[in-house]
Image (cartoon, rainbow, N blue to C red):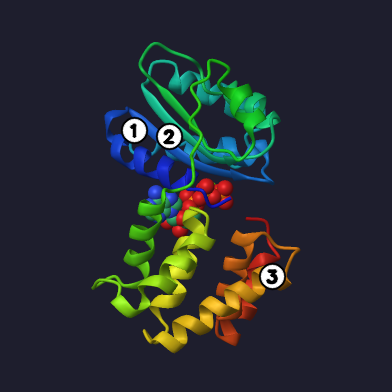
């Protein structure tokens, strides 16, 4: 996770959605119910254009699928299903999204290769690669030093910290934001750099990137730690 699937899909969705007759973005995640997703699709797609059926709260799956099929048949629609895990999601949901010749588009984001291949057997699949060294550095600086350049004395340590993120945007954004609120001194930078190295050596359970995320957790103030742990109890 954290490679940038949702970010990329979101950017494309926002840039393109006005070119379609109707559009919807639905987050699926690991636990979803077909009823709930179909209901959210209807509410989003029907918005502005058409009255949402008044009995939407009580409609069963078949009725909602039928409603969607009828509504979408003659429309150019854009639907994004974000973060799909289960291959069944494909059969669960695609049936309600009729193929038409209007230039409609369905975007799915997923961490699971099988889900992508099942949904798009014609190989229209984009696999995101980690950021290059250069891109990683730029993203890090944007977060850690938003209004200036990286100070020369912090350059080497910063580069070593960024290197530990292995090009993963989530790790770079986390550590960059952590460093943004710290004192921009050599001692502070060294302390965080050394702690990260210590974590990597002494925490073999976690891979490099998880160690970076673990460090951002360690540095949270106590009240936010409780908040974070509480949120982590729930599915995404
Ligand atoms: N190309 C990018 N440039 C700058 N920041 C990025 C980029 N890609 C991702 N990010 C940042 O990295 C973080 C994680 O990205 P995102 O949520 O898109 O990952 P994901 O692949 O959808 O993860 P998951 O599999 O958990 O859903 C976000 O804070 C996002 O803002
Ligand atoms: Mg995502």
- Image coordinates of residue 59 in percent, x first then y, are 62, 34
Q: Is 120 in front, or is 203?
A: 203
- Residue holding disc 3: 201
Please report contact status of discs 2 and 1: CB closer than 8 Å, yes or no: yes
Residue 130 is situated, as x and y percent measured from the top left of the image, at 49, 46
Asked which secondary structure carries label 3, the reply is helix
Which of 97/230 is in front? 230
State the residue in front, 187 or 5. 187
From where the camera sits, is residue 51 visible? no
- Looking at the figure, which quarter contains the C terminus? bottom right
Is 72 in front, or is 180? Answer: 180
Q: Which residue is mark 2?
A: 45
- Residue 149 position, x and y percent, is 25, 71
Please say whether residue 126 is visible from this viewpoint. Answer: yes
In the visual, does 141 lie left or right of 222?
A: left
Residue 151 versus residue 93 in the image, above or below: below
Label 1 vs 3, first from the N-terminus: 1
Compared to residue 88, the image places residue 8 above or below, namely below
Q: Is mark 1 within 8 Å of ligand 2?
A: no
Q: Which mark is residue 91?
A: none
Neighbour tally class for label 2: few under 14, some 14-19, many 20 plus, Cα within 10 Å: many
User: Residue, x 39% and y 77% (percent of image)?
Assistant: 180
Q: Residue at x 39, y 64 (%)?
A: 140
Q: From the viewer's perspective, is 135 left or right of 165?
A: left
Q: Is residue 136 above or below residue 59?
A: below
Element carrying mark 2 = helix
Which residue occupies 42% across, 84% down?
182
**Which residue is denoted by mark 1 in the rendering?**
49
């Amino acid at each position: 996770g954290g490679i940038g699937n949702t970010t990329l899909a979101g950017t494309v969705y926002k840039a393109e959605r006005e070119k379609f007759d109707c559009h919807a973005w639905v987050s699926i995640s690991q636990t979803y119910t077909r009823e709930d997703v179909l209901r959210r699709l209807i509410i989003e797609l029907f918005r502005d254009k058409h009255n949402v059926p008044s009995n939407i709260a009580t409609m069963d799956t078949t009725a909602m699928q039928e409603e969607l099929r009828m509504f979408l048949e003659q429309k150019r629609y854009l639907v994004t299903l974000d973060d799909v895990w289960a291959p069944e999601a494909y059969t669960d949901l695609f049936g309600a999204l009729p193929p038409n010749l209007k230039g409609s588009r369905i975007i799915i984001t997923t961490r699971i290769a099988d889900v992508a291949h099942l949904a798009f057997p014609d190989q229209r699949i984009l696999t995101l690669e980690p950021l290059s060294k250069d891109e990683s550095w730029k993203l890090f600086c944007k977060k850690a030093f938003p209004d200036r350049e990286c100070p020369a004395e912090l350059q080497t340590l910063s580069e070593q910290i960024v290197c530990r993120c292995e090009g993963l945007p989530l790790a770079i954004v986390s550590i960059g934001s952590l460093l943004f609120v710290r004192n921009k001194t050599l001692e502070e930078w060294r302390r965080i750099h050394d702690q990260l190295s210590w974590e990597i050596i002494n925490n073999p359970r976690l891979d490099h990137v998880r160690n970076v995320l673990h460090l951002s957790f360690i540095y949270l103030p106590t009240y936010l730690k409780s908040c974070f742990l509480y949120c982590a109890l729930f599915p995404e």
